[in-house]
Amino acid sequence: MAFSTLTKPLFPSISSFTSKPISKTSLLSFNNNNNNNTLFHSKKQCSLVVNNVLKTVEPTQTSQVLDSVSNDVGSLVSKPTILVSEKLGEAGLQVLRGYGKVECIYDLSQEDLCSKISECDALIVRSGTKVTREVFEAGKGKLKVVGRAGVGIDNVDLKAATEFGCLVVNAPTANTIAAAEHGIALLAAMARNVAQADASIKSGKWQRNKYVGVSMVGKTLAVMGFGKVGSEVARRAKGLGMNVIAHDPYAPADRARAVGVELVSFDQAISTADFISLHIPLIPTTNKMFNDDTFARMKKGVRIVNVARGGVIDEDALVKALDSGIVAQAALDVFTEEPPSKDSKLVQHENVTVTPHLGASTKEAQEGVAIEIAEAVVGALKGELSATAVNAPMVSPEVISELAPYVLLAEKLGRLGVQLVSGGSGIKSVKVVYRSARGPDDLDTRLLRAMITKGIIEPISNSIINLVNADFTAKQKGIRISEERVVVDSSPELPIDSIQVQISNVESKFASGVSEGGQISIEGKVKYGVPHLTCVGSFGVDVSLEGNLILCRQLDQPGMIGKVGNILGEENVNVSFMSVGRTSLRKKAIMAIGVDEEPNKETLDKIGAVPAIEEFVFLKL
């Protein structure tokens, strides 16, 4: 299939910078509700943009004028407001202040938080702030990201966050070691009655016989939840000479074996353990998981440590188990209600050791968590993808890095496809075809599917659509997104050769965009780091997806490029790319024209009036 292509202009337009990777050293960043960014990566690039308006300036003055232009433009862009509702380490606050306006307001009531949140682009919390549906509703679409400084996110309504398009990120790694160390500290303190003996001596007593402890060597520790913290506790317990078993329905067996831990059933874990260490998230299925029935199945005299979430234990049931001797001792860092009441029977029980939620409270962990969550929030505000997102496709940093050039292509193809649809009953079925030299198990397309969905929905929705709520909104609108992977003979170094979007059972406002199978079909590739449209319907083209696009179906005859180019030139519309694809010599052809500006109606009418042009469509990218 033959085609001809005009080369790119010698001097790039502003839009040509938008497809380049975002650098941490970018001079200026412009953000809108759709998370589109326009970047000047250096003063040298910025000077290319303003060069034409500096023609009358002496060379020695250019730097001064450039600085002035940069400052003026920067002043037009308001910094995002970041609300920090609980204490955060200074190192994290410095990261936040480098990007936005930071407001630290602690101990907000729900009413005050809802009142304040409408002014905020981001919210950072720890475990004490409840981010409810009412908070997201009060955010009115302005709230873009909630950062949880820690691991657990049970104080954030994830369903509401997703519905309102708000990304939720956490800091899952920085406090892992601190939490594991605190778990081991409580384990040892409980076994040797450290807290009780300390209080006894300080009250003037000397009760050596009363506080005889138990040894941990040779005892069985059941780690309930074998995630990051649980596995670190297991490693340390093994070093203390304990026999460690674990229960976690999602933990890979090979990871457990590498630590020297046997994965067992829930019943086997609680019935054979001498010590039980809890590392379970608080979700509906784990709420009060340790209750009267659970304690009744435990080995008499078991000892329990909880540095995870208080709600996983029925505290009344635990008091009864302690009184009966089923549970010999408990060491608790977390509680159902924090802080617990002063007259709590559990807290006051002589066989219970308590600390005020100190799991992550080391200087190193606090600084690490503060930096980790601050960087995640700033990255989200910049429109970058986060590997710590908890309500978006969980994509590893390696996959994010590899697929980054294809993210923009995926969204652009979605936007093109929906604009080719002409009225009717709306879009119901979309098929995405990935062509790649890699096998299905070596290609993670969740990120690309979400971006295609975003591109399809956003132009036809009144809501703010982003990566977080794209799939949710698609289901609400009854749009089914399916995927197909086709193995092709291309470079295995590239994850994807091309992406094709097919929209079925709709009418097209551009008939040539319909394939032989009857679907609207568009296909694209990434070339030199820039997304390109390579096929429309049955016609091959090659045009960069920058700025806007005009598609024309015409009779294949000489002079067509010149005629359309002259019309656009006379109306001061700059052409960035032009490509012609045809089925055969002197038959039908499609001309794809990339333009920087949006032509007015009169200009488009002139193009449509060219005798050889049979149909055309203008598409915004």
Image: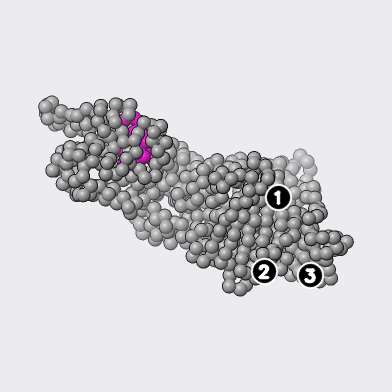
Q: What residue type is labelled 2?
A: Ser
Question: Please, what is the dominant secondary structure of the magenta stretch?
Answer: helix
* Total marks in image: 3
The residue identified by callout 1 is: 16
Residue 104 visible within the image = no
Residue assigned mark 3 = 614
Which label sits on residue 508? 2
Q: Could you tell me which secondary element the residue under label 2 belongs to?
A: loop
Is 603 located above or below residue 305 in the figure? below
**Pointer 3 or 1: first along the chain:** 1
State which region is magenta.
223-237
Tell me whether the residue at label 1 lies in contact with that at label 2, contact meaning CB atoms closer than 8 angstroms: no
Q: Earlier in the sequence, mark 1 or mark 2?
A: 1
Q: Nearer the viewer, mark 1 or mark 2?
A: 2
What's the residue at 68%, 50% (across, down)?
Answer: 525
Crowd band around label 2 with a 10 angstrom C-alpha radius: few (<14), some (14–19), many (20+)? many
